[in-house]
Amino acid sequence: MAGLDLRHFLDLSDAGPQALRAILADAGARKAARTGLPKAHADDGAPLDGYVLAMIFEKNSTRTRVSFDVAMRQLGGSAIVMESGSMQLGRGETVADTARVLSRMVDAIMIRTSDHAKIEELAHYASVPVINGLTDQSHPCQIMADLLTLQERGVALEGMELAWLGDGNNVLNSLVEAAGLLGFNIRAGIPAGFEPDAAFVTRAREAGSQITLTQDPFAAVKGAQVVVTDTWVSMGQPGGDAVIAAMEPYQVNAEVMAAAAPHAWFLHCLPAHRGEEVTDEVIDGPQSVVWDEAENRIHAQKSVLLWAMGKL
Ligand code: CP
Ligand code: NVA
């Protein structure tokens, strides 16, 4: 039976504004409290002592894989990593049966897959929380790390003016969702045909957020407090010379950063394609907080896990 009261984290709206703020506050406090400790040393109280997370990967990952594993260790629990190609899921066992079996064996499931419908199906049949580790549609865990990173730099999320340049992809969809839930505005400079999912944009606008889509990269970044980009070709998406040519005007370089607000922060979920969506000068420069952003995947996801387990 589907667990109707379960706290799945398929998208940011599953948690809602109040829980998202609580997750960010808890993540900041936990991070501060463990300064200087070895990476896998458990937090005080080891709140997930005895808990185990299963992770299913149907796409490549470095950050998501390591950060969830280390997050579970820091909470006193453990994690099992599975590639779908080496699972029975990869040779025809159904998503529903996989959900039923894993729910008897582990306390939560994280999955990275292409089709968002698959993660919804997994959540439907699971009796433990399911967490979205990226689909073609969204990447909510990434955005929690991004928001934590900006909070650490003293940026007030409410009313924040954020610019996005490049492909309107899964990361932008979740960023747009966050804007609607937490009350900030996004100006996205995107070539025609690469816009974010219209449903995310509509919901954020209905919530009162200003989501501006423009084909002018400088209009997008003008005065922005934060500039964000991502790969021009996401995993599993068609690339090619025509896509790269369409994206080239949207590269985040020194000229673009100069048009943003003074001391604007630069974010990138990584992996970066240096020389394409961002220059070395920007990603390695003083306005870049991408390494904090990557580390914060651990801290933000710990609090997502605690929320999903009903402990926050
Ligand atoms: N940003 C991110 O999700 O990185 P990985 O693909 O390495 O997990
Ligand atoms: N948009 C990118 C994010 C990678 C973490 C992708 O889906 O490939």
Image (cartoon, grey):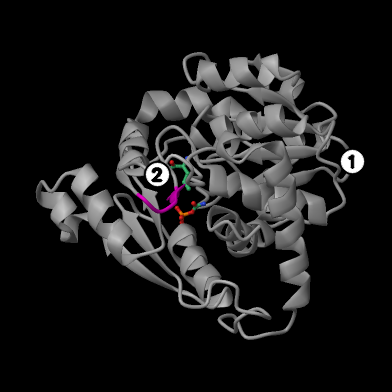
Q: Which mark is residue 167?
A: none
Q: Which residues are magenta?
A: 127-133
71 up-or-down from 158: above or below: below
Q: Is residue 7 left or right of residue 187?
A: left
Q: Quadrant of the C terminus?
A: bottom right
Residue 85 in the magenta stretch? The answer is no
Q: Which mark is residue 3?
A: 2
Q: Nearer the viewer, residue 182 or 77?
A: 77
| Residue linked to disc 1 | 262
Visible residue check, residue 275: no
> Does ligand 1 reach within 8 Å of label 1's beta carbon?
no
Q: Is residue 127 left or right of residue 293?
A: left
Residue 140 found in image quarter: top right
Q: Tag 2's secondary structure? A: loop
Residue type at mark 2 is: Gly
Q: Nearer the viewer, residue 294 or 41?
A: 41
Q: Mark 1: give few (<14), some (14-19) or many (20+) Cα within 10 Å.
A: few
Q: Tag 1's secondary structure? A: loop
Mark 1 vs 2, N-terminal side:
2
Q: Residue 251 location in percent, x, y?
A: 61, 34
Q: Mark 2: give few (<14), some (14-19) or many (20+) Cα within 10 Å.
A: some
